[in-house]
Image: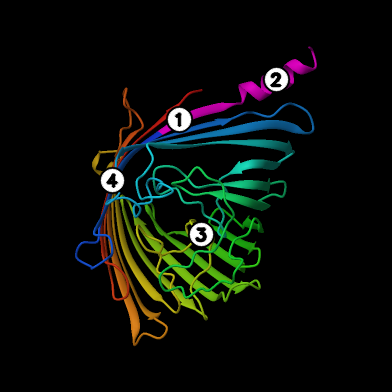
Amino acid sequence: MGVCAPASAAFLDDSKASVDTRNFYMNRDFRQSGAPQSKGEEWAQGFILRYESGFTEGPVGVGVDALGLLGIKLDSSPDRAGVTGLLPQGPTSKRAPDDYSELGLTGKLRVSKSTLKLGTLIPKLPVLQPNDSRLLPQTFQGGLLNSMDLENFTFNGGRLTQVSQRNSSNREDMTIMKGPRRNIVTGANATTDEFDFIGGDYKWNSALTTGYHYANLDGLYKQNYLTLTHVLPVVEGQSLKSDLRWADSTDDGNSNVDNRMLGAMFTYSLGAHAFGLTYQKMSGDTGFANVNGTDPYLVNLVQINDFANQDERSWQARYDFNFAGLGIPGLTFMSRYVKGDQINLGAAPGDGKEWERNTDIGYVIQSGPMKNLGLKWRNATYRTSFASDIDENRLIVSYSLPLW
């Protein structure tokens, strides 16, 4: 008992658990664009339970994490389902089931400042950004090694074998995102159970961080990704942040992937205000390559679109305001406009064009019995010369409760 007690104490005393809830209403309107479906509209309630244990004592610490996901349909119908990404579709019709759920377990080992995790993962890397923009997060199965043993250097490497999409409880093999005009073509074997990744970020000083990451979606594409972030203090209360990204994606035998991506985002912060400008350019024989269902790590990834089509050039102007500067902490506002052109339409004449405008207004209660209750309204307008126009609204009520 004398040997086991400290190990058990660390395992339990360092553990933490929380539950997050999301009440999510989404309306996606195609009615003015001649799309096959005039409207998507659904309402659902989500619950996300997270548990993270501590580690046992000794040179090799052992622990376990758990993730419980539950989505409940509040309102949907076959004529309005299937395009919001909020709920699953039925196997033989577009009718959404009453609920869907997932339980994920993750074992972990720690040596010094290195941790190996095996099981359910939500890794966040330039080469893989799980989608968490709807009711429940996208999850993966596999292994991940994270190490911070070298000073100022963070290493990540591993393999993923299965994916559960944001509106599904099924685990399945992975494939590549094709998009409306990415012009990506795959062969007969378009899925795989191997996504390998390796890379790291080095923090040169408090202002500058650079990174390199490599990924291989077996048989479909290989990708090299470089990142640089720098924050330049100007005067007190003002700074200029630079975020530079470059990726080179090539095929891996069973696709035609050939893409170079350049992205640059510059944000000037002035007290409660932030002004942003971005530029993004795609070149090569296809658009950007990423795992289907994930968010591509792009500066012009916005509410509806990512502006990652073949040859596309896009610009963004953005403005943020934090009302804490006016004595209302927790209230925020964001508005942005993105325009893309030079899109390769294949055999169709001319170049494609598209634009999107977003507005977000959010408030999180800062104190009292309703602390951490968040309210958010997200509005988007998307117009294009080659696909369906979209008007969209999302209303989200969220709450985060630490259990211990």
Report the amino acid beneath label 1.
Val
Q: Nearer the viewer, mark 2 or mark 4?
A: 4
In the rendered image, which residue does mark 3 sit on?
292
Q: Position of residue 83 (x, y in %)?
A: 34, 55
In the rendered image, which residue does mark 4 sit on?
77
In the rendered image, which residue does mark 2 sit on?
8
- Which comes before the other along the chain, label 2 or label 3? 2
Question: Camera-side residue: 173 or 21?
Answer: 173
Q: Position of residue 317 (x, y in %)?
A: 32, 66
Q: Is residue 276 left or right of residue 310?
A: left
Q: CA distance from mark 2 to mark 3?
A: 41 Å
Please report contact status of discs 1 and 4: CB closer than 8 Å, yes or no: no
- Which comes before the other along the chain, label 2 or label 4? 2
Q: Nearer the viewer, mark 2 or mark 3?
A: 3
Q: Nearer the viewer, mark 3 or mark 1?
A: 3
- Stretch of the chain drawn in magenta: 1-20
Q: Nearer the viewer, mark 1 or mark 4?
A: 4
